[in-house]
C-alpha cells in the first residue's frame, strides 16, 4: 500500500490502529541437502527433467519442506527413461540386455538388437508398459 504524501509505518499504524504491521517473510535458513537426494536430482537433470531454475530453487524448497521435496524428486527420478525400465528390454542369460522394440538398432541375433549408447535415456520408443 502506498501513501501520498509518503508516511512511515509508525505514522500509518497510528492513523489506522486496526491495521496489522506487515513483516517481510524471512528467508528459510539453509539446510544441507543429503547427497543421495542430490544424486537423484542430478540424474534427473542429466535426463533433461530439471533445469537451472529448478537447481536454483532446490535449497529453498528443501528448507521449507524436506520430505515433500524428497518425494517430488524421487517421483521425477522414476520418470527417467531407461532400457531396463522399458517393456522392449530383454535380458537372456547373463547378457547386459537387448532391445526388441526398435529395428534401427544393430541386430545382434534374431529379433534382439543392441541397446543404444544412451541406454534408452532419450529413446522415443521407450514404453514403460501397463504395469504402472
Ligand atoms: S532402446 Fe528404446 S525401445 Fe529399446 S529397450 Fe531401450 S528404451 Fe526400450
Image (cartoon, helix red, strand yellow):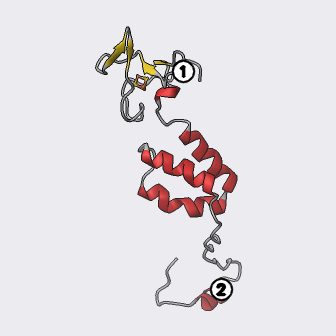
Q: Quadrant of residue 65?
A: bottom right
Which is in the foreground here, disc 2 or disc 1?
Answer: 1
Residue found farthest to the top: 110
Tag 1, which secondary structure? loop
Tag 2, which secondary structure? helix
Q: Position of residue 67 (x, y in %)?
A: 69, 51
Q: Is mark 1 within 8 Å of ligand 1?
A: no
Placement of 12 over or under 73, stated as above or below = below
Q: Quarter containing ligand 1?
A: top left
Question: In the image, is 102 to the left or to the right of 35?
Answer: left
Q: What residue is shown with label 1?
A: 94
Instruction: Assess disc 2: are there few (<14), some (14-19) or many (≥20) residues with their C-alpha within 10 Å of its C-alpha.
Output: some
The image's mark for residue 13 is 2
Q: Position of residue 7 (x, y in %)?
A: 53, 90
Distance of label 2 from label 1 (alpha carbons): 76 Å
Task: Give me the residue at 28% from left, 20% from top.
Answer: 104
Q: Position of residue 10 (x, y in %)?
A: 63, 91
Question: In the image, is 106 to the left or to the right of 74?
Answer: left
Amino acid at each position: 500500500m502506498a501513501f501520498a504524501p509518503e508516511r512511515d509505518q509508525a505514522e500509518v499504524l497510528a492513523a489506522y490502529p486496526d491495521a496489522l504491521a506487515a513483516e517481510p517473510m524471512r528467508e528459510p535458513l539453509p539446510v544441507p541437502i543429503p547427497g543421495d537426494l542430490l544424486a537423484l536430482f542430478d540424474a534427473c537433470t542429466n535426463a533433461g527433467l530439471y533445469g537451472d531454475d529448478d537447481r536454483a530453487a532446490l535449497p529453498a524448497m528443501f528448507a521449507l519442506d524436506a520430505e515433500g521435496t524428497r518425494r517430488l524428486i524421487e517421483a521425477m527420478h522414476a520418470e527417467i527413461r531407461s532400457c531396463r525400465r522399458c517393456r522392449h528390454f530383454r535380458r537372456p542369460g547373463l547378457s547386459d540386455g537387448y532391445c526388441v522394440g526398435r529395428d534401427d538398432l544393430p541386430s545382434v541375433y534374431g529379433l534382439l538388437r543392441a541397446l543404444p549408447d544412451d541406454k534408452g535415456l532419450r529413446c522415443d520408443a521407450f514404453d514403460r508398459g501397463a504395469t504402472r
